[in-house]
């Protein structure tokens, strides 16, 4: 099935009563420094503090709408998707179990429990994924994967749909890419609403399975747990559904850890809000793309979330990177 704008629009109607229509922020100082117009769709102000609420709620609402309501929902995630499915289960009053690796952000683990889900921790993502697959075989149990599911993708695409309702003439949109759900949904929306707008995905160089997959033309899986501060992009491999959309992107960037730290510090200061390293990461890709442009551009960045625990925060702020002003 090839998803279209109509599928994203249907998702938007389903989730309207359960999620926020998030704000778009700008920084006149950043625009002056870069010489271009930047817009930030701030999903850090979303329910559960991340865009994942959209995909989680849409999938459960779709199950209800199509007469497939399960007795038990399960999911596997290192963080934000865990909270999203737990939140969705709470809203629709369906018992939920979430499988998470032990190295997941502590704030995300506790928040998932706070939404009423049972949390099962395991040593790493490979074990987590194996456990959820085994649990999915039980009767009346529905597994909502973090990205490789059409209704999850449709839900994630509603963030861009809202943004395009508020903004005109966007030249390019950038998203962080873990498993590719947000990037895929954004691509589908953008192609339907504003075909001239370019769409780019961005991931950490230290967790570059998507980039390697795009280079080789087949899905590549990481050998071990990636060493990156962008914990929202620590997926081991993209899915077969998301991969076909990633192959349609206008470009893909891999970003080093030092730039992830740099932009997390600067965007926190410029936008006056808390955001995760994962969603600050695309700003470096935007800077690199803008260096190749000869005319003034309007660029949209989907800020994916704002859930960061103390350990990650300490690593981000260990060194002051704000002595060097952003520029092209």
Image (spheres, rainbow, N blue to C red):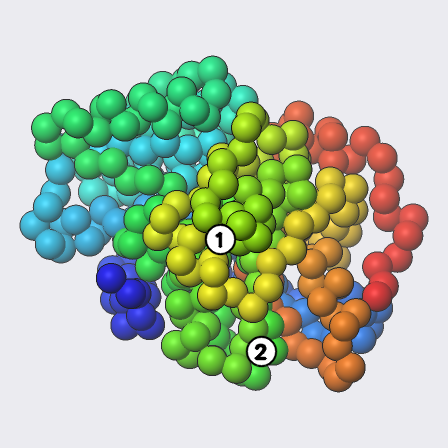
**Position of residue 216 measured from the top left corner of the image (x, y, whole percent):** 53, 50
Q: Which residue is drawn at 29% across and 54% down?
A: 150
Between disc 2 and disc 1, the foreground one is 1
**Position of residue 140 measured from the top left corner of the image (x, y, whole percent):** 11, 32
Question: Of helix, strand and loop, which one carries label 2?
Answer: loop
Residue under pointer 2: 170
From the viewer's perspective, is residue 75 above or below residue 179?
above
**Position of residue 176 measured from the top left corner of the image (x, y, whole percent):** 57, 52
Furthest residue in direction front, as rendered = 216
Residue under pointer 1: 217
Q: Which of marks 2 and 1 is nearer the N terminus?
A: 2
For the C terminus, the quadrant is: bottom right
Q: Residue at x 21, y 51 (%)?
A: 61
Q: Can residue 165 be seen in this view?
A: no
Q: Is residue 213 left or right of residue 312?
A: left
Q: Is residue 1 left or right of residue 182?
A: left
Q: Can residue 325 be seen in this view?
A: yes
Pick the residue in front: 34 or 211.
211
Furthest residue in direction left, as rendered = 67
Asked where in the image residue 291 lies, by quadrant, the reply is bottom right
The tag on residue 44 is none
From the viewer's perspective, is residue 286 above or below residue 138?
below
Q: Residue at x 42, y 53 (%)?
A: 243
Mark count: 2
Within 10 Å of disc 1 (Cα), the crowding (few <14, some 14-19, many 20+) is few
Label 2 and label 1: CA atoms lie apart by 29 Å
Q: Residue at x 19, y 53 (%)?
A: 62
From the viewer's perspective, is residue 237 above or below residue 171?
above
Question: Of helix, strand and loop, which one carries label 1?
Answer: loop
Furthest residue in direction right, as rendered = 323
């Amino acid at each position: 099935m090839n998803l279209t704008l109509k599928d994203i629009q249907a998702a938007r109607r389903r989730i309207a009563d359960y999620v926020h229509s998030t704000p778009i922020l700008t920084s006149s100082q950043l625009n002056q420094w870069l010489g271009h117009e930047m817009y930030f769709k701030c999903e850090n102000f979303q329910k559960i503090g991340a865009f994942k609420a959209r995909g989680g709620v849409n999938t459960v609402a779709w199950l209800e709408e199509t007469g497939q309501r399960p007795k038990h929902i399960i999911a596997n995630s290192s963080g934000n998707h865990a909270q999203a499915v737990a939140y969705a289960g709470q809203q629709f009053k369906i018992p939920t179990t979430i499988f998470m690796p032990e190295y997941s952000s502590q704030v995300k683990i506790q928040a998932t429990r706070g939404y009423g889900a049972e949390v099962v921790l395991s040593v790493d993502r490979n074990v987590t994924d194996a456990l959820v697959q085994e649990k999915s075989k039980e009767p009346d149990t529905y597994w909502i994967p973090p990205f490789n599911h059409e209704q999850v993708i449709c839900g994630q695409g509603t963030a861009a749909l809202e943004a395009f309702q508020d903004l005109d003439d966007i030249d390019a949109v950038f998203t962080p890419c873990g498993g590719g759900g947000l990037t895929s949904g954004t691509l589908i929306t953008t192609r339907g609403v504003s075909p001239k707008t370019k769409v780019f995905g961005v991931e950490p160089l230290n967790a570059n399975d998507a980039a390697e997959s795009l280079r080789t033309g087949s899905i590549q899986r990481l050998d071990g747990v990636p060493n990156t501060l962008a914990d929202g992009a620590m997926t081991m491999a993209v899915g077969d559904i998301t991969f076909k959309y990633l192959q349609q992107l206008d470009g893909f960037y891999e970003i080093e850890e030092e730039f992830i730290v740099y932009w997390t510090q600067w965007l926190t200061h410029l936008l006056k809000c808390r955001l995760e390293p994962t969603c600050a990461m695309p700003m470096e890709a935007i800077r690199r793309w803008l260096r190749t442009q000869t005319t003034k551009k309007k660029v949209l960045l989907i800020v994916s979330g704002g859930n960061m625990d103390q350990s990650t925060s300490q690593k981000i702020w260990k060194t002051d990177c704000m002595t060097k002003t952003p520029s092209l």
